[in-house]
Amino acid sequence: MNYLIDTCVLYPTVMRTILLEAVKLKHDSAFWSEKILSEWSASAKKVGEFGQLQADSEISILRANWPNSIISFSFELEESLYLPDLNDRHVLAAAIAGKCDAIITLNKKDFPRQILDQYGLIRLDPDHVILEYLKDDAYIIIEIVQDLLREARKKSDEEWTIRQLLRKARLPRTAKALSNLIDG
């Protein structure tokens, strides 16, 4: 599958890390545009200067690790598209230009299925995609999440659980499934 990944999925570190590691290990493809990366940086700036510095360094690492994932598209394509939020047209334009199969986003209302259908695209929730990877190969997802959990515990004074970490990352169904697999 070829996935176009929206800003709201790239910006949370835990969600992005799980998703991209799974995509890579399963030999699928992930794409984004310069505009999506710019939105990520701008969103992080709202947290403060350190937030933007961290985001910019994570964006640099993303560029280095995924050198062929940036999609370019024409201004004319973007302007010709309609979405309920006109500021999201660049996401749809990138997905069309990149011949993607799906847009992974948390913004359901901004990407109506009837509009995406016209371009042969589907909208997927990151929690759903990760759960599908979990069904296919639980070991991969468990390993990725356990690495993130170790890192979260190391960087903070909190004794995170898998469920807490994934719920905070807005992956509630993955949190429940992994808690049941590992703890139950």
Image: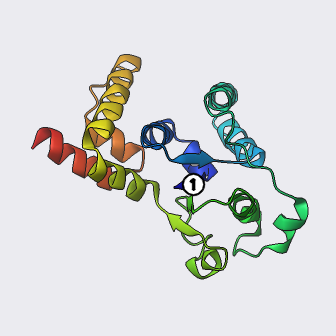
Find residue 58 and report its image quarter: top right
Q: Residue furthest bottom?
A: 114
Q: Tag 1's secondary structure?
A: strand
Q: Is residue 127 left or right of residue 109?
A: left
Residue beneath the point at 24% across and 51% down: 176
Position of residue 115 relative to residue 60, above or below, is below
Mark 1 residue crowding within 10 angstroms, few (<14) / some (14–19) / many (20+): some
Q: Residue furthest front?
A: 27
Q: Position of residue 30 (x, y in %)?
A: 58, 46
Find residue 4 and report its image quarter: bottom right
Q: Is residue 21 left or right of residue 153?
A: right
Q: Position of residue 129 (x, y in %)?
A: 42, 55
Q: Nearer the viewer, residue 159 or 110?
A: 110
Quadrant holding the C terminus:
top left
User: Mark 1: which amino acid?
Assistant: Asn
**Residue marked by disc 1:** 2
Q: Is residue 125 left or right of residue 9?
A: left
Residue beneath the point at 67% across and 48% down: 32
Residue beneath the point at 76% across and 76% down: 82
Q: Nearer the viewer, residue 26 or 35?
A: 26
Find residue 154 and report its image quarter: top left
Q: Position of residue 181 (x, y in %)?
A: 16, 44
Q: Nearer the viewer, residue 5 or 159?
A: 5
